[in-house]
Amino acid sequence: MTARLIQPSGRGFLLFDAHPGGCARIVTDMAAQVQPVTRSGERERPVALIIGSSAGYGLAATVAGIARYGVQGVGLCFERPPTTRRTATAGWYRTIATATLAQETGSDFAFVNGDAFTDATKDDVLDLVSKRFGGIDYLIYSVAAPRRTDPVTGALHQSVIQPIGAEHVTKTLEFDGDGTPHLKEIRVQPATDAETADTVKVMGGEDWARWVDALEAGGLIRPGFTTVALSYIGSHLTSAIYRAGTIGAAKLHLERTASVLGDRLGDYGGRALTSVNGAAVTQASTAIPGIALYVSLLRDALGTGMSSPLAQSVDLWDQLTGTAPLDTDEQGRIRLDRWELDEAAQTAVTERWEAATPDTIGDLADTGWFRDEVRRLYGFEVPGVDYSVPCEPDLPWPAV
């Protein structure tokens, strides 16, 4: 494949190509924001398995762990390689850059490209862990997927983003081809019981528990082992479609799974937790009706007061390693979203939500920031990258 100009094109929030240089620069810039913790003597680097390491909070947790604590281990993700027509997915290029970061910081970190839901992938990853590290200190589970094949029954389950019990009418934000924002009202039909159950099958805690089962069966759980699954609660403005909807049912199952796993891991002096992260622009969140509007309004209300996925991930690692005390709620969930659900912040964004109309949206929401953040997910709109220069899209996956 030869070098070519790569420009953003697509439909809605979905772009067809990713920019290798932009994706790499994003990872480099993230790492530069992290202050390394001084390691004393020859203290062993912690070993982590991060599932969902190439995007969103999973990527942030990977970069923060490597850059701050010298974490070693394995990152697992599911990305598409380049073809003759299209570039690879953005996560493919971000993973290449993260592998380079690990190498430059002396961290032994391998990356596996595969379907986290299959037993074959679990076997491959845990075989690698066994041979290379002998065990795991941390398992971070950050998976957002549209479908999952049950490895036991062979049944295919599809996740849906719908309310439960009644139709939901909400405002949503869309952009036309030249980036002009439009406020629209949409109706989302309620999910059936079967659709809700399927969503729990995909996005709940069942697969997380299977990973812990596999680690335990392989004798790979080290003393003091900690596993955390990343979750979200969000605002009352989005609750009908999220926390009180099908995805929320899956998150509730995830939290109940943490309780069950925690009881089992006590035998190892271990623990299982969920981490409630704050709102962010991710490839998963852009698919949720109303979220684009909500996050744009939140940005306008808080500005740089929004905590980035990287900053939250640094906070998470500090808490998991004991550098900082755990900040948990009455249900034992780590809360990294207090800045978002602060009463003043929610009052400000609610006022904007209620006042938002097609004529006022430009004054109430930071739509330009949101549009740029969506493009950054694909490596575009990244400062310091010259998009007029052709680049090579056919880059190999990091050697394991």
Image: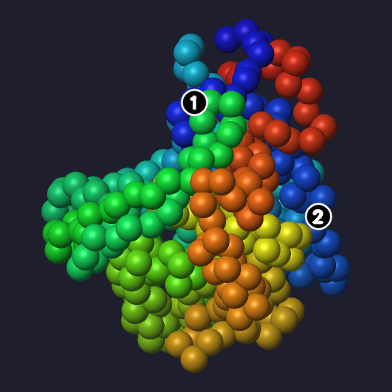
Q: Find residue 254 and report its image quarter.
A: bottom left
Image spot of residue 138 (x, y percent): 55, 68
Q: Residue furthest bottom?
A: 330
How packed is label 2: few (under 14 Cα within 10 Å), some, or many (20 or more)?
few
Identified at 43% across, 64% down, the residue is 238
Identified at 49% across, 18% down, the residue is 86
Vertical comparison of 211 with 93: above or below: below
How packed is label 1: few (under 14 Cα within 10 Å), some, or many (20 or more)?
few
Q: Secondary structure at mark 2?
A: loop
Residue tagged by mark 2? Answer: 33
Q: Earlier in the sequence, mark 1 or mark 2?
A: 1
Amino acid type of the residue tagged 1 in the rendering: Gly
Amino acid type of the residue tagged 2 in the rendering: Gln
From where the camera sits, is residue 236 visible?
A: yes
On the picture, is 339 further left or further right than 286? right
Q: Secondary structure at mark 1?
A: strand
Q: Find residue 28 and report its image quarter.
A: top right
Vertical comparison of 181 with 43: above or below: above
**Image quadrant occupied by the C terminus:** top right
Identified at 35% across, 67% down, the residue is 240
Q: Nearer the viewer, residue 134 or 236?
A: 236
Q: Which mark is residue 151?
A: none
Q: CA distance from mark 1 to mark 2?
A: 31 Å
Residue tagged by mark 1? Answer: 10
Q: Residue furthest top?
A: 2
